[in-house]
Image (cartoon, rainbow, N blue to C red):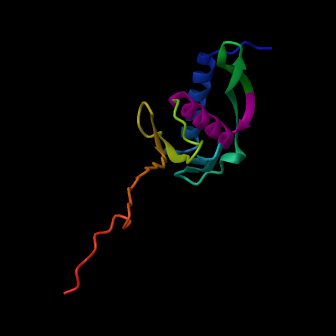
Amino acid sequence: MEALTYNDYVASVRALISTLRILGVSAVAVEFSGSGGSRSIDGVHVDNGLSLNGHEIEFINPREVYTPGGYKKQYTRESISLYDALVTFTYDQLSDTGLDWYNDDGGQGTLEIDLSADPPTIRLGVEIYVVRTEDHIYDLGENFGLVPQENN
């Protein structure tokens, strides 16, 4: 088995960006959301309407693998569609943030890649939903805390 590294992964991301540019793409948006422990990619959009499933690329997949010392990345080479490569890249970027965007009340966001810039820019926007519960304790007493009103 081929021993792949983080540098190989970075090279495959650069190849992905180059391929998208060659195909005339100048902007990518990957939308995601999650809650209750479930996560999903809601859409992958490119500005020129290219079908991302119709094109394959060799891509390094950075999977999180549990070891006795904790989680670490294991890199594997795969031939996948441009769509799947962008999904894989998005999940990896989200994992690297350390944000818990898909458990409990969850969250959503967008990964945007501007390929017209040199170098390209990547923006990852994440919204995390938080429900705050406050307890208020009232001493209602004999009249339930109400003050009697006089009749005029």
Residue 62: x, y in percent?
66, 25
Residue 8: x, y in percent?
63, 18
What residue do we see at 53% from left, 45% from top? 25
- Quadrant the C terminus occupies: bottom left
Give above or below for 92 relative to 49.
above
Span highlighted in magenta in the image: 78-97
Instruction: Give the prevailing secondary structure in the magenta stretch.
Output: helix
| Residue 107 lies in the magenta-colored region | no
Residue 76 position by quadrant? top right
What residue do we see at 57% from left, 23% from top? 10
In this view of the protein, which residue sits in the foreground, 100 or 63? Answer: 100
Residue 52 in view (yes/no): yes
- Quadrant the N terminus occupies: top right
Residue 45: x, y in percent?
57, 51
Give above or below for 89 relative to 49.
above
In this view of the protein, which residue sits in the foreground, 14 or 86? Answer: 86
In this view of the protein, which residue sits in the foreground, 145 or 56? Answer: 145
Residue 49: x, y in percent?
58, 54
